[in-house]
Amino acid sequence: MIVAAAVLVSGVSLAVTAADFTPRQWFPFAAATVLVALTYAMIGVVLGPLLGRLGGLYAMFVLPFLDVGIAQNVMFDAAPPGWGVWLPARGAVRLLVDGAFTSTMDVTGALPLAVGWLAVTGVAAVLVFRRMTSLRA
């Protein structure tokens, strides 16, 4: 269900983007959008039980905004702040910007970084979900 929601939200986001902007490479641009959505969906699965419904909701408003909206925003600075390189969306946003403005893949380390973050957060989400469901049984 989480994957379907992330893909649906990403599809809507890409459709809205396509109304006014055409990236140089659609595939990396779209893949990066889905990677960010899935990574933060997994983070939400982990934080929800830890912080409760309301706390998790607030955290999931603030964390992606700080990461994608401020730390990785190339309109503020071409390089992220020092703390921004450690955030989950770093690789995916670099891939997204590369797909948006270049016709070749120039950021070779971005995809492994993005997939790595998704793998780590995905494993954490599975462990939290298994623990939650085993406690109820």
Image (cartoon, rainbow, N blue to C red):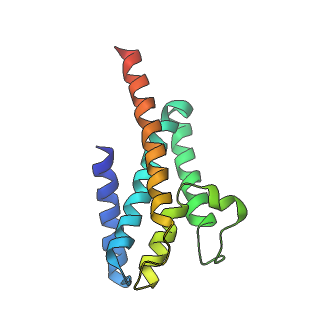
Residue 47 locus on image (x, y percent): 52, 38
> Looking at the image, which residue sits at the far right?
82
Q: Is residue 137 above or below residue 78?
A: above
Q: Residue at x 54, y 56 (%)?
A: 64
Residue 70 locus on image (x, y percent): 62, 65
Q: Residue at x 29, y 58 (%)?
A: 8
Q: Residue at x 52, y 59 (%)?
A: 89
Q: Is residue 71 above or below residue 61?
A: below
Residue 131 locus on image (x, y percent): 43, 23
Q: Quadrant of residue 100?
A: bottom left
Image quarter (top left, top right, bottom left or bottom right) of the C terminus: top left
**1 lies left or right of 70:** left
> Looking at the image, which residue sits at the far front?
108
Q: Quadrant of residue 69?
A: bottom right
Q: Residue at x 52, y 48 (%)?
A: 60
| Total numbered circles | 0
Image quarter (top left, top right, bottom left or bottom right) of the N terminus: top left
**43 lies left or right of 62:** left
Q: Quadrant of residue 104?
A: bottom left
Q: Nearer the viewer, residue 15 or 95?
A: 95
**63 lies left or right of 98:** right
Q: Is residue 80 above or below residue 121?
A: below
